Amino acid sequence: MASCNEGGAHPGNAWHPQTAAVRVAVPRTPYGENSEALFLTSGFVQPSAEAAAARFAGDEEGYTYARYGNPTTASFEQRLAALEGTEAAIGTASGMAAILMLCMGLLKAGDHVVCSQSMFGATIKLIGSDLAKFGVASTFVPQTDLDAWRAAVRPETRLLLAETPTNPLTEVCDIAALADIAHRAGALLAVDNCFATPALQRPAALGADIVVHSGTKYLDGQGRVMAGALCASHALVQEAFLPVLRSAGMTLAPFNAWVVLKGLETLHLRLQAQSATALRLAQWLQAHPAVARVYYPGLPEHPQHALAMRQQSGCGGAIVAFEVRADGAEQARARAFAVLDALQTLSLSTNLGDTKTLCSHPASTSHGRLSEAQRQAAGITQGLIRVSVGLEHIDDIVADLARGLDACAR
Ligand SMILES: *Cc1c(COP(=O)(O)O)cnc(C)c1O
């Protein structure tokens, strides 16, 4: 099936990742349930007043109140940490809540952040606009230009933040090289691993200090719940992030934690299958006369193909973007809309990471709030379509996209 590498034994754990994904953190209750229990409780009964005092003071292990922690959430955190190869993880209500926790936990007024200019739109807004109000400065640099990252670092730089591959143009950055730049500057590197997931890429093994997740995407994998997480050392989780969770309350709901915990069990299978289908779709698109350009790290023509294959277990991932051939922006938009409106099987939706293939027009949706100049700079043209490849058969995916594309080629 897939040409991707299967991945070796898990660092720091005797189990292979596939085994860890179903076996880590299954604390059974006396009933002996085989599937992980879901603890829907906001409070916990204390054995004694003395124990309650010790738990609140942090001197004794034990659950007190679900904003601080819940056994189902803890199982998700332990399993995700095992897959990412970090000592610990902390769940959050959404991916953006995780990035807010990252910033609140690590930064203060006067600090500086260097961030890829191709990050998720809300991340750019949070770092560039919202954090600026609290006196944190930021510089946005081209994702793949290491010299630009180096040049942007200042004495007060505390954090470098990247996302690889990026959305929607699948630019790949060199995680190990960015970790080196960060550490030479006395800063930390955080990597948003939403697109590749630990099934394909483990940023911590390449030197990243913090791995950021939107659990809403591939970790759930079936488009059901919002979730997020930060994976890092025990020290960072306990000393920098847990205090923020306790006071600011961006807590992952136990039900959502249970859904993503179970989602992790099939993560490897899904990513391998979706990546294999994405590669076949990218190859088909490349050969179609109505397609001007295909963006997919699994294609040898992708500018960072070799790096992507090295860094992502030999897989391109499950996101493919392509531009329809057209004369000018107006015709490009009309053709992209025609391809999307001709879909009968695939979903017209701006989410990603689902088992159902999702198609979107970034220029008018996820990147619709940018000015035309900003969009051009980011390479988000009016003819661009993003496909988050699901688990349907490749022939059905191709047939659905062919309906609109064949009409353009005529
Ligand atoms: C969706 C997404 C986020 C934000 O996650 P939410 O769960 O929607 O808050 C962050 N980063 C990337 C790369 C994403 O795709």
Image: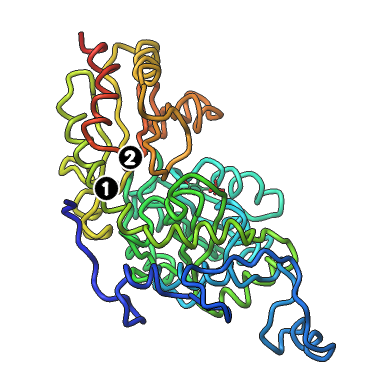
**In the drawing, does residue 176 fall left or right of residue 112?**
left
Query: Number of marks in the image?
Result: 2
Residue corresponding to mark 2: 389
Figure quadrant of residue 341: top left
Identity of the residue drawn at 56% across and 54% down = 227
The type of residue carrying mark 2 is Val
**In the drawing, does residue 77 fall left or right of residue 402?**
right
| Disc 2 secondary structure class | loop
Identity of the residue drawn at 58% across and 73% down = 237
The type of residue carrying mark 1 is Ser
Residue corresponding to mark 1: 275
105 and 393: which one is in front? 393
Residue 195 pos. (x, y %): 39, 50
**Which numbered dot is residue 31?**
none
| N-terminal-most mark, 1 or 2 | 1
Q: Residues within 10 Å of mark 1 (few under 14, many from 20)?
A: many
Residue 179 pos. (x, y %): 39, 66
**In the drawing, does residue 106 fall left or right of residue 179?**
right
The answer to whether the residues at label 1 and label 2 have Cβ atoms under 8 Å apart is yes
